[in-house]
Amino acid sequence: MTEKTAHPQTDDDTMSAQERAAIKERAAELKAQGRAGKAAEKAAANEAALLAKIAEMPEPDRGLAERVHAIVATCAPDLEPKLYYGQPGYARKGKVLCFFRSGQGDKERYSTFGFSVQADLDDTSGLWATSYALTEPTEAAWAELETLIRKAAR
């Protein structure tokens, strides 16, 4: 009689195909970033990759991502554009501070703009939002997003 060996559950058993693809894409991004070389070349390569990713997005996500990119570039020019899990992100000293997630790319009903723990959004109440849905933002909503980005990046 042979004894069966119990195998611990693997990540493949708990993650969706979309999650596994995002992790593989992130690993490829990290590998590409390591090859990018000098800081200026790396920054240019990161921005080019981010802009190419935005260009691939279907509308209306492409328009939303383009507007987000323009706002971040204007109000927080010290943040470095880079891909973050296959989506546009903006980093300081290599750590992503804020990011855009394509709703269509994630198979969700809306896109989001989010902030990482690197963002300076803390509120004395102990409660603050770290992610915002983007569907058809008004000019007032875009202005609020700009204010949040400025606050997060200070």
Image (cartoon, rainbow, N blue to C red):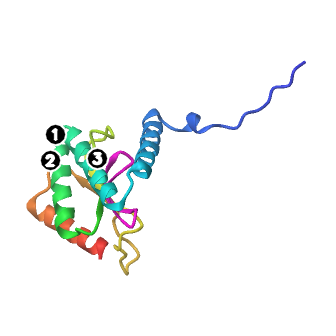
Q: Dot 2 surroundings within 10 Å: few (below 14), some, or many (20 or more)?
A: some
Q: Does the residue at mark 3 contact the one at mark 1 (Cβ under 8 Å)?
A: no
- Residue 57 visible in this rendered orientation of the protein: no
Q: Is residue 12 left or right of residue 116?
A: right
Q: Does the residue at mark 1 contact the one at mark 2 (Cβ under 8 Å)?
A: yes
Q: Residue at x 90, y 18 (%)?
A: 1
Q: Residue at x 87, y 21 (%)?
A: 2
Residue closest to the eye, 147 or 137 = 147
Image quadrant where residue 105 sits: top left
SS of the residue under disc 2: helix
Q: Work out whether mark 3 precedes mark 1 in sequence or the reverse, and give the earlier one.
A: 3
Establish if 67 lies above or below 18: below
Query: Of helix, strand and loop, which mostly describes the magenta segment?
Result: strand
Q: Does the residue at mark 3 contact the one at mark 2 (Cβ under 8 Å)?
A: no
Residue placed furthest toward the right: 1
Q: Which circle marks residue 49 in the picture? A: 3
SS of the residue under disc 1: loop
Q: Residue at x 27, y 42 (%)?
A: 109
Which amino acid, mark 1? Glu
The mark closer to the camera, 3 or 2, is 3
Q: How far apart are the two marked residues, 1 and 2, measured between alpha carbons?
A: 6 Å
Q: Where are the magenta residues, as a range?
A: 82-98
Q: Which residue is mark 1?
A: 59
Q: Dot 1 surroundings within 10 Å: few (below 14), some, or many (20 or more)?
A: few
Which amino acid, mark 2? Gly
Q: Which residue is mark 2?
A: 63
